[in-house]
Image: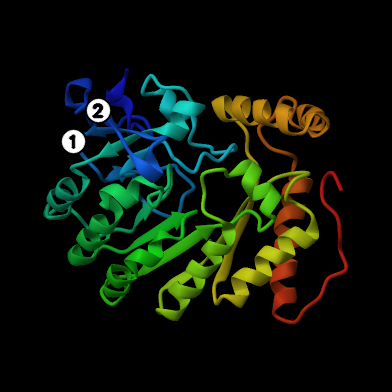
Amino acid sequence: MRWALADDEHGGQPALFGVEELLGPQRSTGRLSELEFLPVTAKTVLNRVGRNSPMPFGWTINAYRGCSHACTYCFARPSHEYLGLSAGEDFDRKIVVKVNAIERLRVELSRPSWRREHVAMGTNTDPYQRAEGKYRLTRGIIGELSRSGTPFSILTKSALPMRDLDVLTAAAEQVEVSVTFSIGTLDVQVWRATEPGAPHPARRIDAIRAMAQAGIRTGALIAPVLPGLSDRREQLRDVVEAVTGAGGAVVGSRALYLQGATREHFLGWLAQHDPALHARYREAFAGRSELGPDYQRWVSDTVAEEVRRAGGRRSNRTGGLFA
């Protein structure tokens, strides 16, 4: 297994840990019994984003690899193949845990060369997936970033940040902090089918409310919008109204992107879930990773219109790609 590539997200990053540093799998019990944790000791935790990246941040931290949320469409699935694991069930169940992440980060933040640039968490796999309940690495990382005066942001599908309101609130008094929740839909059937390991989206709305009441900058990214599954106007409206009603901001939206192992996994799942819709996807996504600019524009315009509508402005535009 090519463990040395575990955090080589942007090319040119030196190996962060080798196979000799794999401490051995740990099978969990009880609520986490279906998961297998693979503890490693990381050589570095702060990862530099490529200089040509369009991302609005320069550094990332990913304390975990793989994700128990098991989202069918997750773009990060191919990263598990770098480890010699599968992008399918292994990604969902075999979770790499950087058990020394807190201690390693403390060292990196203490270097004179560290300029306290913005750090993003949740850019690859969720920092608040179920492993966090056991290892509490994200909670410790928040404390280290705060103490060093480093601003940070978190993107998650979990409601677990509510557990960390104390450290998040304390951090927000010292540095710029934002906690954004990924909520693609409030449709229970779609959620259960496409995000089988993720918390109920209504719990994420509760978490937005808790963050807002605590004075922490918060909101939702409506992503991915799934053609024929979650892109009806009323579905998007439900998300917008729930987010804004909870005191959060809609920070953006993104339509489905399918590439490599993620494409294979998602289309394989869809063939079983809805063969007719699968056939339409095969045609619509033939030779490309995402739908064309007209659809991309439709998604962004529709969400923007619903945001305005939630503030009192109304639109009569209706429909979705396969509506």
Return the residue nearer the eye: 188 or 299.
Answer: 188
Is residue 50 visible from the viewing direction of this image? no
Q: Kindly state the secondary structure of the residue where label 1 is placed.
A: loop
Q: Is residue 172 left or right of residue 189?
A: left
Q: Is residue 117 left or right of residue 235?
A: left
Within 10 angstroms of label 2, few (less than 14), some, or many (20 or more) residues?
A: some
Q: Is residue 276 left or right of residue 56?
A: right
Within 10 angstroms of label 1, few (less than 14), some, or many (20 or more) residues?
A: some
Disc 1 to disc 2: CB gap under 8 Å: yes
Q: Kindly state the secondary structure of the residue where label 2 is placed.
A: loop
Q: Position of residue 160 (x, y in %)?
A: 40, 59
Return the residue nearer the eye: 235 or 258.
Answer: 235
- At a point 41% along the width and 79% down the height, the residue shown is 215
Quickly name the residue at label 2.
Answer: 15
Q: CA distance from mark 1 to mark 2?
A: 8 Å
- At a point 46% along the width and 55% down the height, the residue shown is 158
- Please, is residue 64 above or below residue 128 in the view? above
Q: Quadrant of residue 8?
A: top left
Q: Position of residue 262 (x, y in %)?
A: 57, 30
- Residue 24's disc is none
Q: Label 2 amino acid?
A: Ala
* Circle count: 2
Q: Label 1 amino acid?
A: Lys
Question: Which residue is outermost to the front?
Answer: 30
Q: Position of residue 182 (x, y in %)?
A: 54, 55
- Please, is residue 195 above or below residue 303 in the view? above
Quickly name the residue at label 1.
Answer: 43
- At a point 77% along the width and 54% down the height, the residue shown is 298
Q: Position of residue 115 (x, y in %)?
A: 22, 58
Q: Is residue 233 left or right of residue 94?
A: right
